[in-house]
Image (tube, rainbow, N blue to C red):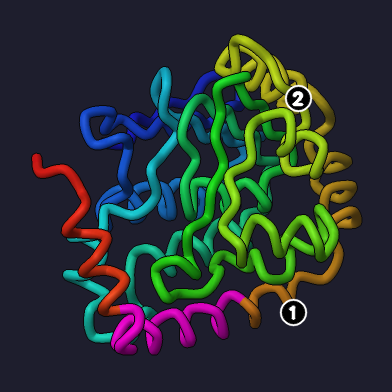
Amino acid sequence: MIQKSLEGGVSTLRMDRADKKNALTGDMYTVMAEALETGNTDDAVRCHVICGQPGVFTAGNDIADFLKYAGGGDLSNTPVLRFLRAIARNEKPLVAAVDGLAIGVGTTLLMHCDMVFASPSAIFKTPFVDLGLVPEAGSSVLGPQIMGHARAFELLCLGETFDAERAEQAGLVNWVVEDVDAAATECARAIAAKPPQAMAISRRLLRGDRTALNDTIEEEARIFGERLSSPETIAAFQAFMSKKPKG
């Protein structure tokens, strides 16, 4: 359900579960985490691209699958947290191509990317609070850094939907283009063609010390796990599942 390829220094990770709107399972998280982790020490990998299918980037977590391994409330050894740790500690440039839905982690993972291309039909939404939960992936730190407190609150707490234009204005997206795959691939190839050590050092200087971010990811995960058993979260999930179409 994750298509992987490596060509010309560009490692492409394509979510391939369009029939389920690319809802992410534990297996999908594991494959992406492994690719990012191994890429850190693989000289053949000079840039990563994360993309979805035409019309859908990802609808976020596959709720049923997520609750199977996270229902106990301890997220420390779950595939999703492994992926979040991997993307935060990823040492290679990361490009994203977003077409259609980018829900939950589909939006927050973009905050770890160096370049994000979105189609005019891209939709960004993080309904964490609506489900009785809290932001994740370090977005409680990265969101305000990228777009300022007010816009971050609107996206992460109020749960407002951002279209591609608003996301670009907020700094979450670099460019809005018709063919996101082509644009992301062209950008990744340009990155891969540059001197790799100079690129790595420059990127590291731009990103700065990530210790506080990594600590925040762990804290968010701890609180997120605790919230899963809270009465308001249970009620919110029950209401969500009762409205969700079957099949």
Residue at image coords 62%, 10%: 178
Location of the N terminus (image quadrant): top left
Which amino acid, mark 1? Ala
Residue 32: x and y in percent read: 41, 47
Residue 11: x and y in percent read: 52, 31
Disc 2 vs disc 1: which is toward the camera? 2
Residue toward you, 88 or 121: 121
Q: Secondary structure at mark 2?
A: strand
Residue 210: x and y in percent read: 75, 70
- 228 is within the stretch colored magenta: yes
Task: Report the disc number at residue 212.
Answer: 1
Which amino acid, mark 2? Trp
Residue toward you, 176 or 113: 176
Say left or right for 80 vs 244: right
Q: Is residue 209 above or below residue 21?
A: below
Residue at image coords 86%, 50%: 201
Query: Which image quarter: residue 48?
Result: top right
Q: Which residues are magenta?
A: 217-233
Q: Secondary structure at mark 1?
A: helix
- 218 is within the stretch colored magenta: yes
Q: Whole-Å distance between the Cαs marked 2 and 1?
A: 29 Å
Residue 158: x and y in percent read: 61, 62
